[in-house]
Amino acid sequence: MFIGHHAVGFAAKRFAPRTSLLWLMGAPLLLDLLWPIFLLLGIEHVNIGRGTTRFTPLDFYDYPWSHSLLMSIVWGAAAALMYFAVAKYKPGAVVIFVGVVSHWVLDFVTHAPDMPLWPGGPKVGLALWNSPPATIVIESALFAVGILIYRDTTRPVDKRGSIVMWAFIGTLAIIYIGNAGGAAPPSLRVLEWMALSCWLLPLWAWWFDRHREVAAA
């Protein structure tokens, strides 16, 4: 999943309209934001060039601390508590927790059986990625629905609220199309820095969300 996780962030605005898209988009991306840090620290590992499904050249054989079900619950609870301590907004905290855990659920659907239930525990996965056409159709549909929910929940207050948002969406689509080609990163270091660049995405979402307001019901 890539744009599918962003779909969750967009849709979450409907359920927590006072919460910035920085948090709402960061929540479903959190496990993937932690992953490259753990790779750089040598805590987790991945193989390049021998993917376990037809959709990706990556073999995610060791990532229990960022991507196990138990740790997704832990990270989700930590993010929700951190947000609530700052904002005191219960709907936002609930949506952030759900958003973080949704990452594991969506990855469970797409990945081969490499999603740990807990560190050292059994691994599961429905392997939707073994059918690239189905993967693209389903994930693109989720992305479109998420965008429509966000668009109907908010409205731009100036041009940046529209132009920057659509530039963000277009960039995500380009990245997704490029990734769908299945080309392997040339090295682990390149993969790590590519993954680290995803930290910019919630900041970009925060930028255009600041230039939009919740639409009247």
Image (cartoon, rainbow, N blue to C red):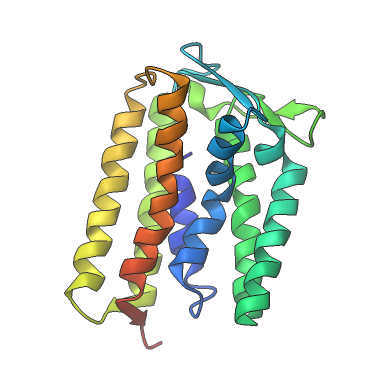
Q: Is residue 128 left or right of residue 169?
A: right
Which quadrant, please, contains the C terminus? bottom left
In the current view of this chain or complex, which residue is farthest to the bottom? Answer: 216
**Which x, y percent locates residue 105?**
63, 44
Residue 3 in view: no
x and y percent of residue 141 in the render? Answer: 39, 47
Name above or below for residue 129 compared with residue 201: above
Q: Where in the figure is residue 113, as x and y percent of width and height?
A: 66, 24
Q: Residue 39's image quarter? A: top right
Q: Quadrant of residue 80?
A: bottom right
**In percent of the image, x 62 and y 77: which residue is there?**
86
**Residue at the front extreme?**
41
| Residue drawn at 81 percent across, 28 percent down | 120
- What residue lies at 66% left-to-right and 68% top-to-bottom? 82
As drawn, the residue found furthest toward the top would be: 50
Question: Which residue ends up furthest to the right in the rendered image?
Answer: 121
Res 27 → quadrant = bottom right
Does residue 215 appear in this view?
yes
Residue at image point 51% right, 57% down: 26
Residue 150: x and y in percent read: 38, 67
Q: Is residue 213 above or below residue 166?
A: below
Q: Nearest the camera: 64 or 7? A: 64
